[in-house]
Image (cartoon, rainbow, N blue to C red):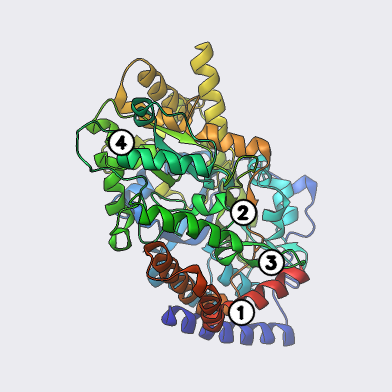
Amino acid sequence: MLKKVLCLMLIAIMVLSMAACSKSGSSDKGDNNASAEIDPATINTGKYDEPVHLTSFFQIATVFLNLFSEEELESCYYTQQQHEQTNIYIDYQWYSPATQEDAVQKTSMAIASGEIPDFMIVDRAQLALLAKTDLINKDLEPLWNAYASDDMKKWTTAEGPDLWESLRYDGNIIALPNVAGSIDQGEVIWIRQDWLTKLGLELPTNMEELYDVMLAFKNNDPDGNGQDDTIGMTIHKDFLNGPGTGDVVGLFNSFGAYPGNWTDDGNGGIMYGSVTDGAKDALTWMSKAYADGLIAQDFSSMDSNKAAEASVSGTSGIQWGAMWNHMWPLQSTVDNNNEAEWVALPLLPAKAGEVAHPQATIGLNQLFVISSKCEHPEAVIKLLNFWVSTQLLPKEEMDKYMLPDEAGTMTFPQHYVMLKTWNPLKNMEAHYHVCESLESGDTSKLTGEEMGYYNDCAAFVAGDPSKAGPYRTFGPGLSSYSALDSYYQGGLYEYNKFTTADTPAMQQKLSTVNDKIVEYYTQVIMGTKTLDDWDTFMKEVNALGLEEITAEANEWYKSK
């Protein structure tokens, strides 16, 4: 962390020096609004007549490091079709893992040197620095309006206006988004339906009822092996880090706390959602659960993989987590025992008559900036259009693009595509379409990706338990997307109100604050400290930087 902060400080000094020079001298691009006026007669959204070459950096997603090959990047069907359909070629100046120590640091040094490629991926801190220079095109809106396809515009506006507003500087759009689905972030409760059935229990409707279910799962031998070997819920040591598997972000949401997000403080400002009064209510619930043996007594030494073993092995019957949890790790439970049945519930309110609000933040994966010296800035948008078009292909056409992953499963080669974005409603629409096709039998309108989900769900309905994961994710009834749909249709998401780059104090001190929060919360859950120590705890985290961070966050919030 210190190394990262010092690097950012050095770069900031160099960038500010560049900004000062650019103000005192002349600029090749004037005000950097190279796209401010576009003659409609010059707009060509199709293939270039002559090859267009763009330079960039290639950031290799860490989950795909073992799959990546420079040779295959150039030879794969996606790249070949990109050339064929657009006549655009990307000349990569380097390839590097997308980590702070590798690609991110190299990008920062390029910014500091003043030599950047035609387009590149940046994070919010880097964008904030670039906004003070003449290195990037600072008026992308006219270009976007002229060249972005209708599908692209639909995808990138589905998250609402806050996403695009977060990309503005002095009123102009200075970066393009790789959009993700914020609705996918909502946590759900995964629960063993077969255990409920065996014990004659109904699905719980609030956290009080869920506690009673956990007691039954602990004490009434739900697995029927005659041994006292079950617990109520899965949890790991980094329990505020979610959505994942076995965290308790969703549990905190049920009590009106939003870990890691910034929420309304009731006085026109924002406050850190990890330390609200709702967090104290969640801790009271969890400390009781720990004392009653419903939580593994050694959870504080378990990472998420180790904690997941309780769910996989059949010793835990409840876990909070992400929509994909039945794909992994819960499918392994079913593989080990075909009678096991995990189902997904929406987050439960603390008490009957209340409503739980899942937390989310604006769905923004990456930021793309375009150099002010780029001769064909519209080519970047054309490449994004091409990506979108491939995601809408029917299955027989999409299959041509597929490559095997590490397990040999054929998958779309997104690891070879730098310029991409997503329909934030893609997975929700897949859920709708798959459910409709399962009911009607008509699959003619499914995309290639949706057809894959449909085939898996149909196989599960026909009796194949190995396809329980896709069914409990995209299928009807008690699936994760049925739960997320209830949030979406009900307008229940509680969005993070801090939507800009981390402030200086956040960069330097927030990780230390978060570590202290988890340390104290762990002690409260395990009973070595109590909530009587709350005021002392708050003094400590404020002294560690939370007070300063909150002041900076509110300065931005009240000025926007």
**Crowdedness of circle 2 by 10 Å Cα count: few (<14), some, many (20+)?**
many
Looking at the image, which residue is at 27% across and 35% down? Answer: 221
The amino acid type found where label 3 is placed reads Ile
Q: Which of the marked residues, 4 or 3, is nearer the chain's N terminus?
A: 4
Provide the residue designation for mark 3.
270
Residue 297: percent from the left, percent from the top? 29, 57
Q: Name the residue type under label 1.
A: Glu
Label 3 neighbourhood size at 10 Å, few (<14), some (14-19), many (20+)? Answer: many
Q: Which residue is mark 2?
A: 362
Q: Quadrant of residue 347?
A: top right
**1 and 3 marks in contact (CB < 8 Å):** no
Residue matched to label 4? 220
Q: Outermost residue toward the left?
A: 226
- Point out the tag, 4 or 2, that comes first from the N-terminus: 4
Instruction: Choose the circle earlier in sequence order: 1 or 4.
Output: 4
In the foreground, 361 or 296:
296
Q: Which label number is shown at residue 547?
A: 1
Query: How far separated are the C-alphas under marks 4 and 2?
Result: 43 Å
